[in-house]
């Protein structure tokens, strides 16, 4: 399983200051995404996840300049989330240097045409972001589905449409390992975002068969370290 660092972007800067060695009074603090990404790659990161917080609020990419800066600074894949709600936004992110994108489930799950258009542009480099908490799925104002809607039902439909990667969030709560083990049997890569505070949680996700985990603040504080954990995934991430 791969540990993927996440950099939250706001106003073209990192929301969190990167200061490796802060506990020992060493290192130089920075909020520049390109410098942080370079340091993370030098520490072993094989993929960088960028979250466009301003874009998520605006409904369109707002951090294209920062994405371009990171793209020029590192030679690893860049995955962008936030404000990527359709094919036009995907094209903007790719033009800025992104190699992968995450679209929210609400934007495509009930719009087969939009999902197909996103897949036509991004192909296997498209991921769908999905809040995996049962109560969120149950309370979502579905138009096509008759309640109760299950996570398995949603994932099966996305996989059937050609989606090969899911980014599962849990609102900051600990991921449900039983659910992840069950979804592991479906033909999708599982990436967990959020709810990971230490290496014990990372190890548990690896044992559950998760392909990758996206980590932000816990990585910045040193509670989680970079590198592969457990047996290598049989599926690319």
Image (cartoon, helix red, strand yellow):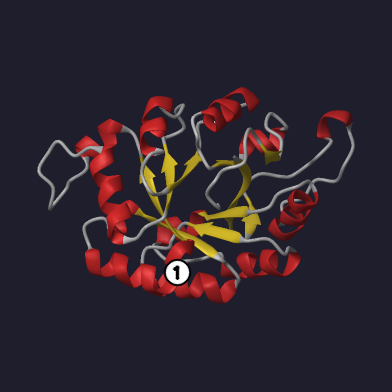
- From this view, report whether residue 124 is shown above or below residue 236: below
* Crowd around label 1: few <14 · some 14–19 · many ≥20 (10 Å): some
- Residue 80 in percent (x, y) is at 53, 59
- Residue pictured at 73% horizontal, 32% vertical: 222
Q: Nearer the viewer, residue 23 or 71?
A: 71
- From this view, report whether residue 90 is shown above or below residue 53: below
- Residue 183 in percent (x, y) is at 37, 38
Q: Looking at the rendering, in which quadrant would you find the N terminus? A: top right
Q: Which residue is mark 1?
A: 122
| Image quarter of residue 168 | top left
Q: Nearer the viewer, residue 177 or 58?
A: 177
- Residue pictured at 30% horizontal, 54% vertical: 158
Q: Is residue 141 left or right of residue 2?
A: left
Q: Is residue 144 left or right of residue 203?
A: left
| Image quarter of residue 135 | top left
- Residue 106 in percent (x, y) is at 29, 53
| Image quarter of residue 35 | bottom right
- From this view, report whether residue 181 is shown above or below residue 102: above
Whether residue 197 is visible: no
- Residue pictured at 9% horizontal, 43% vertical: 146
- Residue pictured at 54% horizontal, 28% vertical: 207
Whether residue 184 is visible: yes
């Amino acid at each position: 399983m791969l540990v993927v660092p996440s950099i939250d972007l706001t106003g073209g800067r990192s929301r969190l200051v990167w200061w490796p060695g802060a506990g020992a009074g060493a290192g130089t603090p920075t909020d520049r995404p390109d410098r942080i990404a370079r340091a993370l790659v030098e520490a072993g990161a094989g993929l960088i996840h960028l979250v466009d917080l301003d874009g998520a609020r605006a409904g369109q990419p707002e951090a294209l300049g920062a994405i371009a800066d990171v793209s020029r600074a590192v030679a690893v894949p860049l995955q962008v989330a936030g404000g990527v709600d359709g094919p036009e936004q995907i094209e903007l992110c790719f033009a800025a240097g992104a190699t992968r994108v995450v679209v929210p489930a609400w934007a495509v799950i009930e719009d087969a045409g939009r999902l197909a258009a996103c897949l036509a542009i991004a192909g296997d480099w498209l991921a769908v972001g999905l809040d995996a908490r049962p109560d969120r799925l149950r309370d979502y104002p579905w138009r096509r589905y008759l309640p109760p809607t299950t996570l398995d039902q949603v994932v099966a439909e996305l996989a059937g449409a050609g989606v090969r990667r899911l980014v599962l969030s849990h609102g900051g709560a600990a991921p449900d390992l039983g659910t992840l083990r069950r979804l592991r049997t479906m033909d999708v890569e599982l990436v967990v975002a959020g709810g990971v505070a230490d290496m014990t949680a990372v190890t548990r996700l690896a044992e559950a068969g998760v392909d990758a985990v996206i980590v932000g603040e816990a990585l910045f504080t040193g509670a989680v370290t970079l590198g592969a954990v457990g047996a290598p995934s049989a599926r690319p991430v």
